[in-house]
Amino acid sequence: MLAVITGASSGIGYELAAELAKRSYDLVVASAGERLGPAAEHFRSFGHRVTEASVDLARGEGVEELWQQVESLGEPVEVACINAAVGVGGLFHESDLDAELNMVSLNCASTVHLAKYVVRQMEARRAGRILFTSSIAGEMVAPQEAVYAASKAFVLSFAQSLRYEPKDTGVTVTALQPGPTDTDLFHRAGMDDTKVGRDGKNESDPGDVARQGIDALFDGKDHVYAGSLKTKIEGKLANAVPGALKGAVHEKMARPEGKK
């Protein structure tokens, strides 16, 4: 059995890969940077084959290289966790355009690009499971993270729509929606000096998020608010709370401390 996990070198993606390794899957793990090698060695400790794809998925060439490596194995993809993402924080008129365009390329374009190959292969076999990592932010009004939240709303909408396209083919689609989680996303987004960057990430453990996500995937659920009880409650209430209130709460959490 083969599983493909993107963004697997750290955070939620790392835990998704470990969770699938525990469940006897061979892995293809993809990420950019130096952390992929040590992560892959850890996954091998579970006794299954691990293939490393050191690629930049924000570039189309990186997605193509990943899929070529997957196809070279000659095995069908049973599970795909399309998880790779980055964040960018700050007011939109002040934030870096290149960083945001790179984020859109990784969070949105690469998701569509890789999903195209995965879905076509799975539908041809009439079997397979896909987990898209969105976020609770995909249902929020998110000042100070406007483009990031929009990118996660895109992933959520994409996952929900795909779920109903292959419903008679044996392919299932699940959206994973974590809240603030103890990963380096906020650090990489330049949000260490915010309340959510300092305190919010302590709400949920990435291992718990991954386990809940994989359980929902194998249960055939359409989505799961994963992590802490607070995240689950916020998710349930997301569509009932007025946008102005959601925006005010998020802005307070994501605004640099000491800045009005």
Image: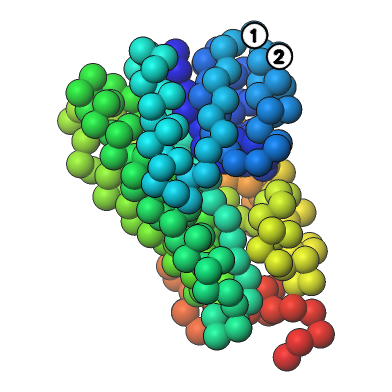
**Residue 212 visible in the current orientation:** no
| Residue located farthest toward the front when viewing the structure as drawn | 61
| Tag count | 2
Q: Do the residues labelled 2 and 1 touch (CB within 8 Å)?
A: yes
Given the image, on which type of amino acid does mark 2 rest?
Ser
- The residue under label 2 is 45
> Quick check: 195 left or right of 55?
right
Residue 6 image position (x, y, % from top left): 52, 37
Quarter of the figure with the C terminus: bottom right
- The residue under label 1 is 47
Given the image, on which type of amino acid does mark 1 rest?
Gly
Picture residue at 65% right of the left edge, 41% below the top: 33
Label 2 SS: loop
Residue toward you, 56 or 40: 56
Residue toward you, 118 or 212: 118
- Examine the rendered structure and indicate whether residue 171 appears above or below residue 245: above
Label 1 SS: loop
Residue 1 image position (x, y, % from top left): 44, 13
